[in-house]
Amino acid sequence: MHSISPFQILFFMAVYIAVIIAALGAAIYGIGGLPLGPFYSIAVLLSGLVFFFVFLLLAYRLVLAIRPLKSGVLEAGSAQETTYLIYSLFILMGFGSLMRSGMIPIPALPPLYKALGAKIGRNTCIAGMIAVPPLVKIGEDCHIGHGAVLSPHAADEVPPSIQPITIGDHVTIGIYSVILQDVEIGNHAVINSNSTVSEGTRIGDNEIWGGSPAIFIKKRA
Amino acid sequence: MRKINGLQISIFLCFFISAATLGIFGAVLTSDLLPLGGFREISIVFLSILLFYVFLIAFFRLFLKIKPLKTGDIPQNSEQETIYHIYILFFLMGFYPLLRSGFLPLPVLRALYLALGAKLGDNTYSSGLITDPMFVTVGRNCILGQWSIVTPHAIENEHLSHLPIVIGDNVTIGASSVVLQGVTIGDHAIVASGSVVPKGTCIKDNEIWGGVPARLIKKRDDAPKVGG
């Protein structure tokens, strides 16, 4: 596994603290300026939390616009590794809490993942987790089951790498299934519950796969 | 996956906004009756959330009383599909954030499942997720393990259906296991952790099942007599 260097942590903390200060400012001077009466303190507190995530998202997009996250091997000490580690700090210290909590209503999850850089078609429902949103593309009318994980990073390899995951239209990913890096899934495919689709797997249109590791079961009638 | 249309969303929003309005109204009225001092405003906020859920559950039950959601296939563009879409919006926007959060104490979670229409026997608890409580019956003294999922619905691309799941007494469902639609599980049975019990499987009394897909591993030799 990577270790995050003190310089990378310092850089991220500077951004993080700037975001907190900006959020407090917006909450106190923006929302606090409204005629709230006795609800002043609770309105400032709750809006501050919302502003924090909005500003953190803007900072995240800015960092990734300057230093795009590219797929490939992350050599120790490379610029790509630094980008990836700073990106992970945003997830670890901010957005991961939203993704993992289960408290976000499911219809709000696709907009969140899109804001984090995933490409998601219309009418797609996601009740699982996308570990690295900028590397994931999902088509229209898909259903990603509860607790499923789309994981474009392989942290267990030496050196670690990130590779995209591409999912077509009308695809169903079962409950608790794990899709690993560099997987392509065709239109109308189904992945059964609790399956693990191994690295580099190519799943064709209308195919049903399942198991751990997932194997081809049959074509859909 | 099917599209929820604007009319269905509007009907749901009427329920949602009514519950929110009644919740806030009730919270303000209640807070005025209590000597809360400086805690009045924060009490209003938390009480509003609590009462919002009470009213939302009441509307949910009322809606399903008037327009029952039946088991079986839900054809496209049918009246049952409209009922289902409004039903699922109650969960997506209201109940799933509570049920999926892992934040509620288990006895509260049990009370919530009962309120949503699950039939749970005495001393039965779930620390997982029951996706459609009204189609699930569980007997006495059962444990549905951490992050287990009991799911009477099947969404497979454009196909959509509900079939009941019936679980007997003294059953253990292991952590992270998935029980799919139409499954029946007998008394004293065990489903091992991380298993997937396929659609329509019938697990008999005292059997131990496990794996993906789950299959019979053995009969329990330590099991008490059925009904004992």
Image: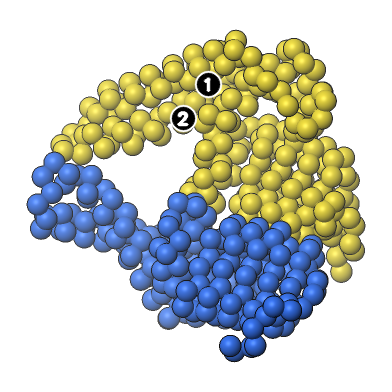
Chain colours: A yellow, B blue
Task: Report which residue position mark 1 lands on.
Answer: A59
The x and y percentages for residue A86 are: 62, 20
B197 up-or-down from A95: above or below: below
Secondary structure of the residue carrying tag 2 is: helix
Position of the N terminus of chain A by quadrant: top right
| Foreground pick, B175 / A29 | B175
Residue A209 showing in the rendered view: yes
Check chain identity for marks 1 and 2: say if they share one. yes
Q: At 79% across and 75% down in the image, what residue appears? A: B218
Q: At 15% across and 37% down in the image, what residue appears? A: A37
Left/right placement of residue A216 relative to residue B5 reads right
Task: Report which residue position mark 2 lands on.
Answer: A54
Name which of mark 1 and mark 2 comes first in the sequence.
Answer: 2
The x and y percentages for residue B148 are: 62, 61
Q: Which mark is residue B74?
A: none
Amino acid type, callout 2: Val
Tally the numbered discs. 2
The chain letter for the residue carrying disc 2 is A
| Foreground pick, B21 / A76 | A76
The x and y percentages for residue B8 are: 49, 64
Q: At 84% across and 40% down in the image, what residue appears? A: A199
Amino acid type, callout 1: Ala
Instruction: Using the numbered discs, state the Cα–Cα distance from disc 1 to disc 2 in whole angstroms.
Output: 9 Å
The chain letter for the residue carrying disc 1 is A
A23 up-or-down from B190: above or below: above
Assess whether mark 2 and mark 1 are in contact (beta carbons under 8 angstroms).
Answer: no
Residue B157 showing in the rendered view: no
In the picture, residue B48 is in which quadrant?
bottom left
Answer few, some or many: residues within 10 Å of disc 2's Cα (few below 14, many 20 plus, some between 14 and 19). some
In the picture, residue B72 is in which quadrant?
bottom right
Q: At 36% across and 61% down in the image, what residue appears? A: B53
